[in-house]
Image (spheres, helix red, strand yellow):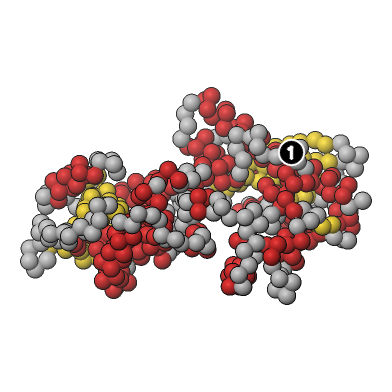
Amino acid sequence: MLITPEPAARSSYRLSKSRYLSGLQCHKRLYLEIHAPALATKPDAATQAILNMGTDIGELARERFPGGRLVKAGYRQSQEALDQTAELLQDPTLPALFEAAFQFDQVLIRVDVLERVGVNELGQPTWRLVEVKSSTKLKATHLDDLTIQSYVLEGVGLALVDICLMHVNTQYVFDGRQLDLAQLFGLRSLNETVRPRLPEVPSRLAAMHTMLAEMSAPAIAPDEHCHSPYECPFWAHCTQEKPPRWIYHLPGSSKTVTLLRELGVETIDDIPDHVTLTPVQRRVKDNREWIGEGLRAALAKVRYPVHHLDFETFMPAVPKFIETRPYQVIPTQWSNHIEQSDGTLSHAEYLCQDGRDPREELTVSLLESLGQEGSICVYSSYERLILERLAEGFPSLRKDLKGVIARLWDLHVVIRDHYYHPDFDGSYSIKAVLPAVVPSLSYGDLAIRDGGVAACEYSRMIFTVSDWIEKAQIEEALLRYCERDTLAMVELRRELRKRAG
């Protein structure tokens, strides 16, 4: 294989694919990743689960390339990975390499799949680059990802004839027997899209190396770019000196924040009266408790017994059950707190505890718990969406489920339209509303505190964990989290009735 010499080093810092993408998002982010990585906020459990899902998808995708070989050296074993890759490339019978390592122009990459496709007129082996993503469609950052990889591969002398993205195909329906990987994964050639971008890479790398050689991080103010295309792990560090009522915390369209910054406004309290704000933004600016005239009447519309319903779900990238698709929402548990007209409270719950499709049993048990009478209090439209999909999936239960849907009463809408507390900080999520209205009740004492973690823990409990003690611990944590969501609605209704007089 022909290896062309690398250009003269521009700095002593070697970049990776991920660091290059960080530099495209924000030079300050890249600077901190290299010079002060300890300042980053570690990914939370839900974010880490998403990263793990991407790893699992990548490993499954390798089965699309039978006979391929994995470069086993870890990501911290750079030289070993480069040596193993060089050795494997000498085998003309090898159809594909997984996690192959290459370095050029101070950039080290690991390639998801490098597939051998033939030989060119010079007798060189030709290759196809395949980047595997757990996403369901092409994103702009995928093009940057493929561009830097292609730049390095061609820089070391590989004859690259195709540049492809492999992603999850949400139209694939699992037949319940064996995964059809050709249908599960979509393969899209982006050769004609990526190649025109390659000439931009050297100047971008040069700018990054020049910046990295400076004695301090570039002075880049935190803004919308900190959240796109990825959440920056240095957000907390870069905003630690901002005032509590920083203008960026104003809810709603970012266009309003941009306008206010152009006017020189730094805090929400300094917003001029002539600036047009939405009702929610105005309440945030006023920064005081607001009780709308219609709150009492809205709360009085419920009919007893009042059921308080919450679902927990998971969305496996690889479908687990017959006639389901990738990332299809699968409800796995529900909680129902039932309040009688005299204030008496009872609780019912369901959680599927094994690997079978839980939907039909979940639905039957839910219909029994909800009965035929009373309002069904929910928080957001999510429960309605789940019920509608269950009605589509189980025609024999459709009539009963439609009856349930007709009884739904959304507490989120009531609070949004008729109540505000300054401790909401502009957010109407139940995690923000509950501690403000009912300080004695929160999620702080729970092992699981949000739906994303609940989904990940359910999947882990069912498909990964084998120790029965750990399974039991996860099961209990899931039940208590879902129960807290419905108890929260009970207590919110009770407290709001008091405040409404």
State the residue at coordinates (82%, 57%).
Answer: 290
Give the answer, above or below, for where 345 lies relative to 61: above
Which residue does the image show at 58% across and 55% down from the upper left? 242
Residue closest to the far front: 215
| Label 1 Cα crowd, 10 Å radius (few <14 / some 14-19 / many 20+) | some
Q: Position of residue 83 (x, y in %)?
A: 16, 45
Instruction: Assign the N terminus to one quadrant of the image.
Output: bottom left
For the question of whether residue 253 can be seen, the reply is no
Q: Is residue 450 left or right of residue 163?
A: right
Q: Which residue is mark 1?
A: 441
Residue closer to the observer: 108 or 41: 41
In the picture as drawn, the residue positioned furthest to the top comes out as 469
In front of the other: 472 or 12: 12
Residue 140 spot, x, y in % from top left: 41, 66
Give the residue type that dot 1 points to: Leu
Residue 337 is situated, as x and y percent measured from the top left of the image, at 77, 40
Helix, strand or loop for disc 1: loop
The quarter holding residue 79 reads top left
